[in-house]
Structures are given as structure tokens and as C-alpha cells.
Image: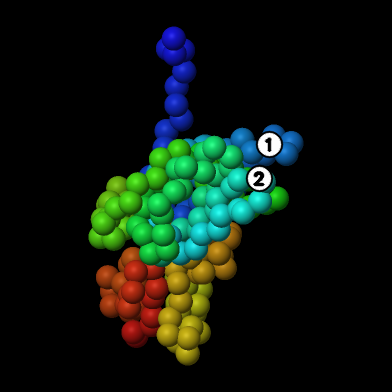
């Protein structure tokens, strides 16, 4: 009989870029949780596109998939009999993933529990859903202008490459939360200073 006291951890809906800027809290070599603001993240609900996969051919069975949602990339890793959850998935598929975060050798990854193929439009739906539900983060007084200038400088300097991905901006400024950077980029988009030629990538318009 199942333990009625058992409580499954919340599967937080997040973008991959949020996970990449979180802090992995370890108990020795064991991963405890991902610190993100005041939240302790253990399970996640992520939507992304499969961009790569690898299956073992030796005695040890494992399957690795890499997914991308425009804000960053993260691996799904399954071992032994659990690899069935990643069967029938191919490069280009849009998937919703519910799973537990793990960290090994300083690499954050997801151990998937449920993976379902979705219509590609679902990626945009999730992005809009998270943008609407995200609370406005207050930037410390006197820092907003400096953060905005740093973001604009990154975008301007990327023009020769045809723009820059938002996740790269986030990774370049680890001292600033992903929420604040996304918030400032949204303001720049609304003001017409930058534009988004493709999801997750921005260019300078001036």
C-alpha cells in the first residue's frame, strides 16, 4: 500500500536558461536541490526541442538527449531499464519533460520521468505562459541603467554575427539574475530598441 505521507516535489515550470543560472546545492557529492531565488528546485517541467541524442551500444545501457528552448540547452539522461522513457524521440521533436534534476561532475541534467511529444507551437505557448506569470523583479536602485547598458553592449557587439542568443547574455552576466535580464530585454523589445529575428535571439535596431 502506498505511503499516504509521501509528497512528490513540485515540478516547476521553468525555462532552461533559468536552470543554468541557478546554484546547485550539494550534500557532499550528492545533489540536494537547485537554488533559484527563494525556491529550492528538485523537479522541473520543461518544454524544448530535441537537438541531439546518443544511445549506448555496450553492456551498460544509457540514453542521452539534448533539448533547447531558445534560452539554453540541457541534457536528459536515462540509465538501464529507464531508457524506455526516451524511446521513439528524434532530433527536431518538440517535447514536454517532467523530471528530477541531477548534478554529476558539475553538469546539471534532468533524469526524465515523463516525456511527451508536442506540437512545435507548444514551445511558444510555454514561453508566453511563463512571461505572463513571472512576477516583476525589482532592480536595485542605481543598477538598472548599468545592467541595461551591459545588455545593449552585448547586443550591439553581436551584429556582425547576426545577433545574440538571450542565454548567452545570461551566461555572460552571472552576477545578475536571469529574471532581471529577461525583464530588461523585454523592455528593450517593447521600446523598439532591439528586435527578435527568431525565438531566443535578439538584434539591435536602434
For residue 30, the mark is 1
Q: Position of residue 195 (x, y in %)?
A: 32, 77
Direction right: furthest residue: 28
Q: Which of 52 and 10 is in front in this view?
A: 52
Q: For the N terminus, which image quadrant?
A: top left
Q: Is residue 114 left or right of residue 82?
A: left
Q: Where is residue 105 in the image (x, y as percent from the top left)?
A: 70, 50
Q: For the C terminus, which image quadrant?
A: bottom left
Q: Which of marks 2 and 1 is nearer the N terminus?
A: 1
- Tell me if residue 1 comes above or below residue 85 in the rendering: above
Q: Using the rendered image of the protein, determine whether residue 139 is visible from the camera's viewpoint.
A: no
- Tell me if residue 93 comes above or below residue 151 in the rendering: above
Direction bottom: furthest residue: 160
Q: Which of 24 and 112 is in front in this view?
A: 112
For numbered disc 2, what is the local secondary structure? loop
Q: Position of residue 34 (x, y in %)?
A: 56, 42
For residue 60, the mark is 2
- Tell me if residue 21 comes above or below residue 172 in the rendering: above
Amino acid at each position: 500500500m502506498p505511503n499516504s505521507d509521501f509528497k512528490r516535489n513540485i515540478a516547476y515550470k521553468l525555462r532552461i536558461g533559468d536552470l543554468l543560472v541557478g546554484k546547485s546545492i550539494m550534500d557532499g557529492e550528492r545533489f540536494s536541490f537547485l537554488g533559484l531565488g527563494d525556491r529550492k528546485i528538485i523537479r522541473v517541467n520543461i518544454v524544448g526541442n530535441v537537438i541531439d541524442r546518443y544511445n549506448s551500444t555496450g553492456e551498460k545501457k544509457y540514453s542521452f538527449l539534448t533539448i533547447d528552448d531558445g534560452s539554453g540547452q540541457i541534457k536528459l539522461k536515462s540509465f538501464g531499464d529507464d531508457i524506455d522513457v526516451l524511446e521513439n524521440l528524434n532530433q527536431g521533436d518538440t517535447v514536454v519533460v517532467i523530471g528530477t534534476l541531477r548534478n554529476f561532475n558539475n553538469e546539471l541534467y534532468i533524469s526524465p520521468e515523463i516525456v511527451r511529444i508536442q506540437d512545435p507551437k507548444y514551445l511558444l505557448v510555454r514561453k508566453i505562459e511563463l512571461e505572463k506569470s513571472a512576477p516583476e523583479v525589482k532592480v536595485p536602485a542605481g543598477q538598472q541603467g548599468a545592467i541595461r547598458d551591459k545588455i545593449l553592449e552585448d547586443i550591439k557587439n553581436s551584429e556582425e554575427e547576426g545577433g545574440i542568443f538571450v542565454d548567452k547574455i545570461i551566461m555572460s552576466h552571472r552576477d545578475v539574475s536571469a529574471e532581471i535580464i529577461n525583464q530588461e530585454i523585454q523592455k528593450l523589445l517593447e521600446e523598439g530598441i532591439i528586435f527578435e529575428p527568431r525565438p531566443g535571439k535578439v538584434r539591435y535596431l536602434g
